[in-house]
């Protein structure tokens, strides 16, 4: 099995995956491409972990893929958004639709930070992408995306002296535009989303950031409450009101996602996975996994 911790996809590696088409790249900071030919790259045959911000828009054709072990069918007019840490697999890469045309836009986390974007501002949206990264763009949104892509390619073809700075400004605009696409898409899908005050949103973002970073080693509400200088009861109340989900629910989802990925895509023993996720014992991990998935770790691995 492929060791997912070693298959990190960055802008420069995506450039290596793209055999032709109109494309540009700035080192390992940024890459954009209109894919017009089937990629020939070994990483497509195995699950890989995204180590950048990546958008894939299907211009024509279709492709099947899985994101964090959930299957998606990317068709014309569909946008898939990936955040750092997502685990992706292209289904049957040798049988890709010959008519498939995809626009790819990716930027490294360091590049995003260097151009003045604070990704934590969009942490809630990022978690929404983690749960459902597939967005169906409206005609107006599609037109806007095409304009950005064309402008980025024109900037590079003109070969300006400050191409990185010019692209940086454009990427900043694209980043905020995609955040708007996501917000509008989620509003169209769910008109009953929790209404958050600015204080609730700030605290929820802070908690999610801590949870994403520390969930594998810290499972208790008290740890996150201490980090945020509030009581466990208050943190639990705010997170529930702001997201509709409890603190343990958030932590459990992140732990189960990690566990599934390690079970499915590595040769680590269940004991090693249990230790990696800081469970007190292998039997405790077994019970936790079965309670949340309906299967034992062994049953899930042998599916």
Image (cartoon, rainbow, N blue to C red):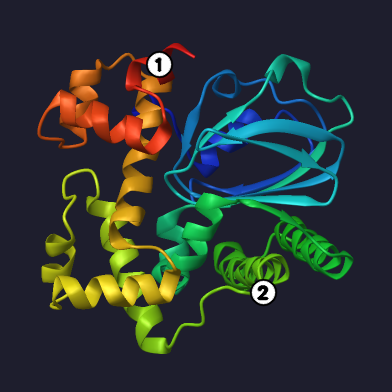
Q: Please state which of residues 148 and 273 is positioned toward the viewer in this rendering.
A: 273
Label 2, label 1: how far apart the Cα atoms are = 38 Å
Residue at 29% x, 61% y is 247
**In this rendering, would 69 be left or right of 268?**
right
First in sequence: mark 2 vs mark 1 = 2
Please state if 35 lies on the left or on the right of 297 as rendered.
right
Secondary element at tag 2: loop
72 up-or-down from 230: above or below: above
The image quadrant of residue 233 is bottom left
Residue 107 shows in this picture? no
Tell me if I can see residue 216 in this picture. Answer: yes
Q: Which residue is mark 1?
A: 299
The residue depicted at 18 percent of the width and 64 percent of the height is: 224
Quarter of the image that includes the N terminus: top left
- Residue sitting nearer the eye, 68 or 107: 68
Nearer to us in this view, 244 or 80: 244
Q: Are marks 2 and 1 in contact (CB under 8 Å)?
A: no
Answer left or right for 288 relative to 99.
left
* Above or below for 24 versus 183: above
Q: Position of residue 272 (x, y in %)?
A: 19, 22
Q: How many numbered marks are there?
A: 2
Rendered image: mark on residue 145: none
Q: Position of residue 288 (x, y in %)?
A: 27, 35
Q: Residues within 10 Å of mark 2 (few under 14, many from 20)?
A: few
Residue 19 locus on image (x, y percent): 72, 28
Quadrant assignment, res 150: bottom right
Q: Which mark is residue 191?
A: 2
Q: Residue 36, how many percent across, how many down?
A: 83, 35
């Amino acid at each position: 099995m492929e060791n997912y911790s070693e298959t990190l996809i960055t802008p420069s590696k995506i450039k290596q995956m793209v055999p032709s088409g109109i494309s540009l790249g700035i080192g390992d900071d940024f890459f954009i491409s209109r894919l017009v030919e089937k990629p020939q790259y070994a990483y497509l045959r195995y699950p890989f972990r995204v180590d950048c911000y990546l958008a894939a828009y299907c211009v024509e054709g279709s492709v099947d893929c899985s994101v964090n072990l959930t299957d998606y069918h990317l068709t014309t007019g569909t946008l898939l958004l990936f955040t750092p840490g997502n685990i992706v697999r292209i289904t049957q890469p040798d049988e890709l639709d010959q008519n498939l045309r995809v626009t790819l836009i990716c930027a490294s986390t360091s590049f995003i930070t260097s151009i003045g974007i604070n990704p934590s501002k969009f942490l809630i949206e990022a978690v929404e992408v983690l749960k459902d990264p597939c967005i169906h763009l409206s005609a107006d949104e599609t037109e806007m995306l095409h304009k950005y892509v064309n402008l980025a390619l024109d900037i590079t073809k003109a070969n300006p002296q400050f191409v990185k700075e010019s692209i940086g400004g454009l990427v900043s605009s694209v980043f905020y535009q995609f955040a708007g696409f996501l917000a509008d898409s989620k509003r169209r899908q769910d008109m009953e989303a929790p209404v958050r005050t600015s204080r609730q949103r700030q605290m929820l973002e802070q908690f999610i950031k801590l949870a994403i970073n520390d969930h594998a080693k810290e499972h208790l509400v008290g740890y996150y409450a201490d980090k945020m200088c509030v009581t466990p009861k208050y943190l639990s109340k705010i997170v529930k009101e702001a997201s509709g989900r409890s603190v343990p629910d958030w932590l459990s989802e992140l732990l189960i996602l990690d566990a599934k990925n390690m079970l499915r895509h590595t040769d680590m023993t269940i004991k090693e996975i249990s230790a990696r996720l800081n469970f007190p014992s292998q039997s405790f991990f077994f019970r936790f996994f079965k309670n949340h998935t309906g299967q034992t770790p062994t049953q899930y691995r042998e599916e």
